[in-house]
Image (cartoon, coloured by chain):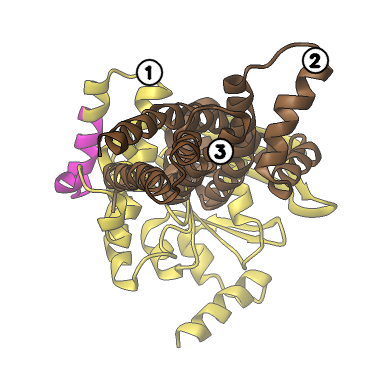
Chain colours: A yellow, B brown
Amino acid sequence: MIKVNQVHKNYQMQSVLNNIDLDLSAGEVVGLVGPSGSGKSTLLRCLHGLEKIDSGTISMQGKTGLIFQQFHLFPHMTVLENITYAPIHVLKHPKAQAIEQAMMWLSKLNLRDKADAYPHSLSGGQKQRVAIVRALAMNPEILLLDEPTSALDPTLVQEMILVIHALKKAGLTLLISSHELSFLKQVTNRMLFLKEGALMNDQDTLTFFNEPGDSPKHQFLSAFHQLVQ
Amino acid sequence: MIDFAQSFLFILQGVSITIQYTLLAFIIGGVLGIGLALLKFNRKAVWLINGYISFIRGTPLLVQLTLVYFVLPGLLGINIPIFIAGVIAFSLNSSAYIAEIIRAGLNSIESGQFEVSKALHIPSFLMWKDIILPQALRNILPALINEMISLLKETAIISTLGEQDIMRRAQLVAAEQYTYLLPLCTAAICYYGLTMMLEQAGKKVEKVLAYD
């Protein structure tokens, strides 16, 4: 689905992505963790084509959709207008079709009655789901979620898990960056650990969390466990 | 009494002249202002635009108007009628202020709105037209109405060139009847009525554009 080959990216002499190799297959749900500034957001933005890479190749079967940490809904448009604007104006879908597809997803994510509401009246969790539906409306096969839980109330993480399951059921491939380890543990089947722009670990979720040892990954994970305790 | 009723009507006829200057200058100045603000926001010709804005804001409108009316014709070798000179001077003057207002409006839009537009593959023209400018316009509407009100009042300066606007007509009546009180009060009431209407119209538009 996505094939990343020896990708490098620099910001003014400083390397932010360093020799990234990655291969994602259709239907996978992959978690991306690492310290702040390790390049998680940059990797997602490069995959979506929002930023150029300096060397290497990214090949893609299907389109990506990117969901930002802060959602960035259009405040002057209703929920339905937020979702249907790009399909109508960019993909040139007929309006009726765009609305029908939007309503289908809004129903699935329990937002049907919010179609005519403006973003300011939505809760954080609802904004998040609208942002997801807006990305879905562009018919992506791969969804890139940048810290989907960081702007949410901790009680909403459970709700997010249900959303991820619904997306998975719809056949989407997901790449999720997050600091919420227990959340990732529950929804992913594969985990990536990024440190200083380099991909240090690429393992199935069970091994990632349970393998004994003392690598940078273990230090990162144990720092988090100490924080939780 | 009959005399005063006639003078009153005479001054009132200046209202349409004042409105013509204000509307034309605001529309032309607005288009120029949007252009200047977009150029500056995209870091094009910044040095030139800053110089222009600095000159307009740093010199009296009367100086600018007389430059356009008395100096520009000599430089270009053409005759510029009062009305055209006035519209040019007021438009240029307004464009500088409007450019700064719009720039502030654009700066008030969070960068995420640009990013998400790009992420949804919305073309640049549509992004400006449907996403960025509507939000910016809403934020700066009070400041724009403010600018239109000061523009309307400042058009009184055109009376110095002999244009028969509200102010000039009031002065003519005053000179003829040897009294300032009534004609000037009439002029003041005309200006005040016009600015009140602008203020009310602004409030209506604000309500239409509101989304929270």
> What residue type is disc 1 on?
Lys
Q: Residue at x 50, y 39 (%)?
A: B175
**Letter of the chain that mark 3 sits on in the rendering:** A
Q: Are marks 1 and 3 on the same chain?
A: yes
Task: Read off the residue under disc 1.
Answer: A92
> What residue type is disc 2 on?
Leu
| Nearer to the camera, B181 or A5 | B181
Task: Read off the residue under disc 2.
Answer: B76
Query: Which image quadrant is residue A85 in?
Result: top left
Task: Read off the residue under disc 3.
Answer: A48
- Residue B5 on image: x %, y %: 27, 35
Regarding mark 1 in the picture, which secondary structure is present there?
loop
Q: Sequence-wise, which precedes: disc 1 or disc 3?
A: 3
- Mark 3 or mark 2, whichever is nearer to me: 2
What range of the chain is rendered magenta?
Answer: A100-115
| Nearer to the camera, B18 or B141 | B18
